[in-house]
Image (tube, rainbow, N blue to C red):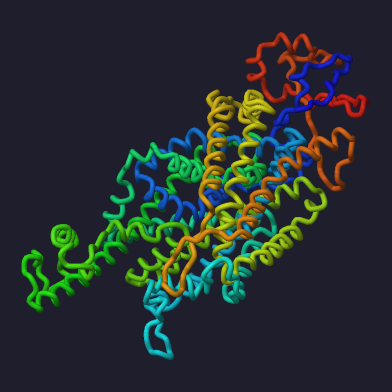
């Protein structure tokens, strides 16, 4: 990294290079100026509880409810959970702590933080803002879906409990009969989905209205910045836990709940040898903590300068993991109940068929060892043992009733929330109550994450551009309006396919690239040791030295490996999406057409491009002495030097180069912040007046 000319002190002595480098942390206490020199005007959290709820609300989202349980179930149960915890400790927590410390010390959003380290790194912040914008576009659509389902939960029976009847033929609608009532309601009534991404179709008016309502809620909650959104967090962050606990208690009373828990947590250690499992675990750690979005940095920038961000990093990461475990228990308790009911219905149907076959006088050697006169009394395990011995003799009319096969159906993403879970809740007593509670929980989980995502957009822009900072309310309103109009892309009949595209490709690779550059910036460009020095000044104690090696080697190599694995997967496996075929009433995996591949490629490029563009513009601006853009705030490159702890003599309150060179490094770490002073800087060959801090 190119460094500015070395400044001299008031006696003309040239300072060493290590002294001239900027420091992340100001020498003063909570009332000190931030990177923009306007700390007095910066809002702050009313309490530590508000901040913790905001960070937890952002990191704990819909992925904890429908992504983590699916991955845990598909990749070895308890073995995947152990792998996840290991990666969380050696990659997730260090990177999360790094972002918290950077935001809290520099008191800026993502753009200002990386520009403060080096103007050529400002593109990292712009990439974070771009990814946050892409995520906000489709994430609010999921909130709109939750609003739609919550509104339809206030009726008995629930509209997805039974298939509708065709008024013309007076028969069950074929599409519903070929699938299930919950699948039909989701794909036809809620989405009115087309058969492929090529068939766009008209807009869905009801879902468009729900999307408008979702953006209105976000706008009203954030219109006053963190002062208004923090108050909403008291409910939106806490309420989901109350619902999850209620569901867990109720679910444990259901038949099949223990089967679901056993199926989920049964460890399969052999999966540790599969690269794909490591990639999925690392990706889940990455997205669970919200790394790279800039929201973590934005939230922490409103903290007091001496807040213990190290403890916050461990606490929030731990809460996030425990929430994932709690959500997984709830999901598989309910799915176990659903699978047990489906399997028992299957047994009853097959036993009834065998009773009819027995009346015809067919061969007796396959007669079961249970009572066929009461199909509902047959135990599932007895039936399966009998079927393994005699089932092959009866042809295709008699089928196996596999509980595990039913457990594996529809447990990923929207399939879990809007198909499998709704089907299970339809079997609950007082099903409208539980359905309303569940979708209200999804709504709050989505909103708390949405607030953090929007904060990752608004805070860096307001910190970096004075014009936007003076019109915070207008910026918030205009951002929400723009998000709604672009979000109309997702309310057309093929909108669900675009949600899948944005979810899979607009965030994954760009965020990995962003975090790689963040790690390189802190660990190698600024220096891991210097960063730990600044954190020590900020926290009044030095974090363990293990972070130095984790940031420089383990985290960086892990993120590069994750990026390589993701790129190779895209290259060797053509991207696909799951489409709904209304004729067969089933889902099918289709390859993206050529134009869709161009779109998803552009999403990745547009989100990643600010990093190299920012570097080139800064390089050209520095080389050609170009002026900065009007309204753009340039964070000062504050230079700090450590003086002797002895009382300074009059007119000699500076440190000479020899004193600095001979002082042990440990002395730098033990002195209090009041022994820092701001050194003068030279710009354009002119010497400025020295200002003591």
Residue 645 in the image: x percent, y percent? 71, 15
Query: At x 77% / y 45%, what residue is drawn?
Result: 464
Classify residue 6 by image quadrant.
Answer: top right
**Is residue 34 among what the camera can see?**
no
Query: At x 14% / y 77%, what residue is drawn?
Result: 356
Q: Which part of the image, by quadrant, shows the N terminus?
A: top right
Residue 419 in the image: x percent, y percent? 42, 66
Query: At x 37% / y 56%, what residue is drawn?
Result: 330
Q: Is 199 placed left or right of 419 in the picture?
A: right
Q: Nearer the viewer, residue 367 or 265?
A: 367
Up-down relation of residue 238 to residue 320 (above or below)? below
Q: Is 325 placed left or right of 283 in the picture?
A: left
Residue 505 in the image: x percent, y percent? 58, 52
Q: Is 33 placed left or right of 501 in the picture?
A: right
Q: Which part of the image, by quadrant, shows the C terminus?
A: top right
Q: Nearer the viewer, residue 51 or 183?
A: 183
**Is residue 475 among what the camera can see?**
yes
Q: Nearer the viewer, residue 151 or 641?
A: 151
Query: At x 78% / y 41%, what residue is drawn?
Result: 38
């Amino acid at each position: 990294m190119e460094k500015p000319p070395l400044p001299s002190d008031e006696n003309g002595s040239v300072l060493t290079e290590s002294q001239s480098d900027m420091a992340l942390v100001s020498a003063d206490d909570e009332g000190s100026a931030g990177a923009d020199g306007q700390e007095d005007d910066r809002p702050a959290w009313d309490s530590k509880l508000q901040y913790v709820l905001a960070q937890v609300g952002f990191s704990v989202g819909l992925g904890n409810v429908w992504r983590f349980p699916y991955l845990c179930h598909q990749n070895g149960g308890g073995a995947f959970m152990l792998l996840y915890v290991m990666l969380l400790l050696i990659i997730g927590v260090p990177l999360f702590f790094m972002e918290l410390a950077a935001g809290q010390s520099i008191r800026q959003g993502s753009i200002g933080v990386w520009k403060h380290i080096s103007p050529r790194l400002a593109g990292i912040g712009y990439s974070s803002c771009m990814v946050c914008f892409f995520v906000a576009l489709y994430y609010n659509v999921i909130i709109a879906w939750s609003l739609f389902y919550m509104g339809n939960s206030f009726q008995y029976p629930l509209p997805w409990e039974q298939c509708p009847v065709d008024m013309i033929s007076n028969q069950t609608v074929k599409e519903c009969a070929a699938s299930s009532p919950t699948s039909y309601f989701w794909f036809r009534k809620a989405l009115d989905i087309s058969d492929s991404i090529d068939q766009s179709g008209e807009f869905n008016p009801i879902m468009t209205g729900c999307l408008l309502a979702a953006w209105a809620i976000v706008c009203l909650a954030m219109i006053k910045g963190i002062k208004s959104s923090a108050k909403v967090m008291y409910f939106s962050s806490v309420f989901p836990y109350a619902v999850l606990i209620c569901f867990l208690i109720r679910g444990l009373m259901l038949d099949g709940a223990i089967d679901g828990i056993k199926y989920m947590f049964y460890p399969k250690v052999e999966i540790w040898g599969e690269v794909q499992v490591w990639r999925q675990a690392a990706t889940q750690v990455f997205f669970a903590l919200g790394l790279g979005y800039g929201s973590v940095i934005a939230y922490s920038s409103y903290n007091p300068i001496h807040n213990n961000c190290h403890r916050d990093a461990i606490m929030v990461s731990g809460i996030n993991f425990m929430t994932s475990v709690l959500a997984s228990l709830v999901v598989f308790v309910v799915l176990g109940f659903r699978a047990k009911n489906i399997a028992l219905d299957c047994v009853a149907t097959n036993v009834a068929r065998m009773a009819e076959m027995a009346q015809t006088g067919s061969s007796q050697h396959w007669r079961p060892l249970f009572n066929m006169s009461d199909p509902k009394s047959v135990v599932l395990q007895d039936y399966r043992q009998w079927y393994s011995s005699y089932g092959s003799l009866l042809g295709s009319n008699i089928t196996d009733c596999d509980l595990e096969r039913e457990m594996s159906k529809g447990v990923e993403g929207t399939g879990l929330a809007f198909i499998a879970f709704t089907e299970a809740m339809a079997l609950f007593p007082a099903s409208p109550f539980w359905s309303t509670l569940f979708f209200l929980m999804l709504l709050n989980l989505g909103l708390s994450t949405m607030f953090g995502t929007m904060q990752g957009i608004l805070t860096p822009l307001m910190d970096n551009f004075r014009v936007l900072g003076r019109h915070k309310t207008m910026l918030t309103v205009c951002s929400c309006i723009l998000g709604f109009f672009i979000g109309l892309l997702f309310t057309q009949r093929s909108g669900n396919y675009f949600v899948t595209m944005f979810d899979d490709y607009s965030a994954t690779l760009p965020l990995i690239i962003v975090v790689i550059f963040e790690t390189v910036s802190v660990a190698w460009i600024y220096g891991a040791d210097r960063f730990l020095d600044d954190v020590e000044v900020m926290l009044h104690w030095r974090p363990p030295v293990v972070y130095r090696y984790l940031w420089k080697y383990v985290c960086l190599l892990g993120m590069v490996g994750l990026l390589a694995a993701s790129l190779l997967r895209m290259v060797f496996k053509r991207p696909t999406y799951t489409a709904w075929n209304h004729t067969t009433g089933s889902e099918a995996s289709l390859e993206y057409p050529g134009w869709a591949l161009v779109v998803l490629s552009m999403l990745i490029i547009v989100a990643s491009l600010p990093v190299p563009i920012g570097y080139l513009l800064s390089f050209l601006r520095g080389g050609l002495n170009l002026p900065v853009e009007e309204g753009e705030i340039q964070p000062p490159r504050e230079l700090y030097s450590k003086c002797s702890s002895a009382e300074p003599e009059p007119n000699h309150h500076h440190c000479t180069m020899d004193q600095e060179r001979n002082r042990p490094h440990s002395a730098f770490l033990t002195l209090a912040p009041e022994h820092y002073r701001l050194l003068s800087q030279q710009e354009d060959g002119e010497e400025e007046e020295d200002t003591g801090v």
